[in-house]
Image (tube, rainbow, N blue to C red):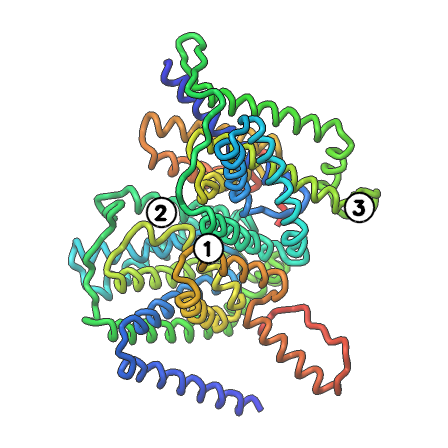
């Protein structure tokens, strides 16, 4: 029983990272109708930004996370201007492929300049554990879950209550109508990118500290995050959260009780079955091609 | 006019074939022959991709999965059962086609990005199977020590080019046929095609299965050239690389992507001994093409031709714009 609960908590912590990535993918998809395959690289950039501030400059972890968010967010805004906005004139598939190009580019620039050596970020809570009943949960995992919960609530508040959040939802519903209502869609696009990249960076910094920071660390989480958003339905925040937690828990359960190979098989089979039953994902509405 | 064009075309093909025939006798360097052979096999794979992507308009991220099925089946049959090469490769191709037929029931409920991700899931499943099913695929170590069915590299070189030309010819005939017109109709507007009496689902499934079989052939040819089958060869990166070459060459032109397979393979060999640098170049090329040259190299070439022709006819009248990259 203890092991079972332990596994679930581990699953939720990994699932949190997928949720953060999935929410970022959703934010960009909502505004641009673009599935950003380069999103995993922002996770990696966030990890390296945290390595720079925490390990090399010896600043506190919280500063590292904030620096990672701001740096990666600004990088996202820059790339929105230089790259993504140019893609907008092309068809959906061309855009998708353009983002693959960007992924190759960023990932390999990182490999070229930062080499393939793994780096680590010391966790602010060290090896401490939180004891609840018979459970001993690693402090860092609690930190990941807490941070994600906090960010999800902030995001909810932003979307539901603030003017900018409402504008963003309006653009997601109908870009042209939103523009006619006087919403600055260029600014909304920049904000969506900042948000998306900042969320990825937090996930990268937190998970980089749990595991290691490498140039290719973003690739697998990106695959799972894509499964998450497709599973939950593209464009649905709620779907991204539920999808992220589901995938995280499934992975952690199968790794603990059966084998790592089965975890991938289960995740991809689940995606296949859900798409077969409901082609728009669990909480997705209309299909946007 | 059209007859003269055909003659020119035929002449060019004869010169090209003659050049490729005599090339290995003058060029003793095995490195180049290997490079040519690899490029030819890559070109076959890209043709398989182009059939589905360029003509029917569906992007698959799971093509490496079909290549893996087409590669491991004959590798297993030849090394562990002792079936002869041709029969084993045929088995792999048929198995891959059958697999494509089966999963097409699921994947063609999807369109657009969802289709791409659905096929990606399939590709990943195949990869996981190759990596873990140790009894059949050899797991991490793969299947090593496959025999070269043609004795030497030169024989393999001729085989690869023969297959490339056969595939190019067959697929070209297919896309020029009424079936090919149905493909293009599906790409243009699926509902309209359906209402015009085209069985769109059957059409898509046919293209998907055929594409999977061509990918399987390419996969089989790769492993017998390398003489080993390894799970590391058929990952998502390979699917993406095939896609990249297809885009750079020009989607829906067959010959453009085939040429791109050779050019990119050769250029990369010289430009980049460092793998990172190679992928950086791929990435930049891909982004630039999406931004500025829709239709890839072949599309741009044809547009330039059309532009020159239009200028000549209208006596330098400005304002000619060709937005479409359809190349019928």
Q: Is residue A191 left or right of residue A252?
A: right
| Disc sitting over residue A215 in the figure | none
Q: CA distance from mark 3 to mark 1?
A: 36 Å
Task: List x then y, in percent, for residue A30.
Answer: 66, 41
Q: Are callouts 1 and 2 both on one chain?
A: yes
Chain of the residue under the numbered disc 3 shown in the image: A
Q: CA distance from mark 1 to mark 2?
A: 14 Å
Q: Are marks 3 and 1 in contact (CB under 8 Å)?
A: no
Q: Residues within 10 Å of mark 2 (few under 14, many from 20)?
A: many
Task: List x then y, in percent, for residue B45.
Answer: 40, 63
Q: Quadrant of residue B25?
A: bottom left
- Quarter that holds the C terminus of chain B: bottom right
- What residue do we see at 36% from left, 47% from top? B126
Q: Is residue B43 visible?
A: no
Residue receiving disc 2: B127
Q: Is residue A128 left or right of residue B313?
A: left
Residue A41, compared with residue A250, is above or below; it is below
Residue receiving disc 1: B240
Residue A214, compared with residue A104, is above or below; it is above
Q: In this orientation, which residue lies closer to the viewer: A198 or A153?
A: A198
**Element under disc 3:** helix
Q: In this orientation, which residue lies closer to the viewer: B201 or A174?
A: A174
């Amino acid at each position: 029983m203890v092991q079972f609960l332990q596994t679930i908590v581990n699953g939720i912590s990994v699932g949190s990272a997928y949720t953060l990535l999935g929410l970022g993918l959703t934010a960009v998809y909502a505004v641009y109708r673009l599935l950003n395959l380069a999103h995993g690289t922002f996770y990696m950039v966030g990890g390296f930004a945290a390595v720079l501030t925490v390990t090399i400059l010896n600043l506190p972890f919280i500063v590292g996370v904030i620096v990672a968010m701001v740096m990666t967010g600004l990088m996202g805004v820059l790339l929105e201007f230089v790259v993504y906005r140019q893609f907008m004139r092309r068809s959906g598939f061309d855009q998708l492929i353009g983002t693959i190009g960007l992924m190759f580019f960023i990932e390999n620039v990182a490999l070229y300049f930062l080499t393939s050596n793994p780096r680590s970020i010391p966790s602010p809570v060290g090896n401490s554990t939180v004891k609840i009943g018979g459970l001993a949960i690693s402090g860092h995992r609690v930190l990941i879950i807490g941070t994600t919960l906090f960010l999800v609530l902030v995001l909810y508040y932003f979307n539901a209550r603030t003017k900018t959040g409402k504008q963003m939802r309006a653009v997601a519903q109908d870009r042209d109508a939103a523009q006619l209502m006087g919403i600055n869609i260029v600014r909304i696009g920049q904000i969506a990118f900042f948000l998306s990249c900042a969320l990825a960076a937090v996930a990268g910094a937190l998970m980089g500290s749990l595991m290691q920071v490498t140039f290719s660390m973003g690739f697998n989480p990106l695959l799972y995050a894509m499964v998450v958003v497709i599973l939950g339905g593209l464009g649905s925040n709620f779907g991204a959260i539920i999808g992220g937690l589901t995938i995280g828990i499934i992975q952690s359960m199968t790794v603990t009780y059966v084998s790592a190979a089965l975890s991938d098989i289960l995740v991809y089979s689940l995606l296949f079955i859900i798409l077969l039953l409901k082609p728009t994902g669990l909480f997705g509405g209309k299909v946007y091609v | 006019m059209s007859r003269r064009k055909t003659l020119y075309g035929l002449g060019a093909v004869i010169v090209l074939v003659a050049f490729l025939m005599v090339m290995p006798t003058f060029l003793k360097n095995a490195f180049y022959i290997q490079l040519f052979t690899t490029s030819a096999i890559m070109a076959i794979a890209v043709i398989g991709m182009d059939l589905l992507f360029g003509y029917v308009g569906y992007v698959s991220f799971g093509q490496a999965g079909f290549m893996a099925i087409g590669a491991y089946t004959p590798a297993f049959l030849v090394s562990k059962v002792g079936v002869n090469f041709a029969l084993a490769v045929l088995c792999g191709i048929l198995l891959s086609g059958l697999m494509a037929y089966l999963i097409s029931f699921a994947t063609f409920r999807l369109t657009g990005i969802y289709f791409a991700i659905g096929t990606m899931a399939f590709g990943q499943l195949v990869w996981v199977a190759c990596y873990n099913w140790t009894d059949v695929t050899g797991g991490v170590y793969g299947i090593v020590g496959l025999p070269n069915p043609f004795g030497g590299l030169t024989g393999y070189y001729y085989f690869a080019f023969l297959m490339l030309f056969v595939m190019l010819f067959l697929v070209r005939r297919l896309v020029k046929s009424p079936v090919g017109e149905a493909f293009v109709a599906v790409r243009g507007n699926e509902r309209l095609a359906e209402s015009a009496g085209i069985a769109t689902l059957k059409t898509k499934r046919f293209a998907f299965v055929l594409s999977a079989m061509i990918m399987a052939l390419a996969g089989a040819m790769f492993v017998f050239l390398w003489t080993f089958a390894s799970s590391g060869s058929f990952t998502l990166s390979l699917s993406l690389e095939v896609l990249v070459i297809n885009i750079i060459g020009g989607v829906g032109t067959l010959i453009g992507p085939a040429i791109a397979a050779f050019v990119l393979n050769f250029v990369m060999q010289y430009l980049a001994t460092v793998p990172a640098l190679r992928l950086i170049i791929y990435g930049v090329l891909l982004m630039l093409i999406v931004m500025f040259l829709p239709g890839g190299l072949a599309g741009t070439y044809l547009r330039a031709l059309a532009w020159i022709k239009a200028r000549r006819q209208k006596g330098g009248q400005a304002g000619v714009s060709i937005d479409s990259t359809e190349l019928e």
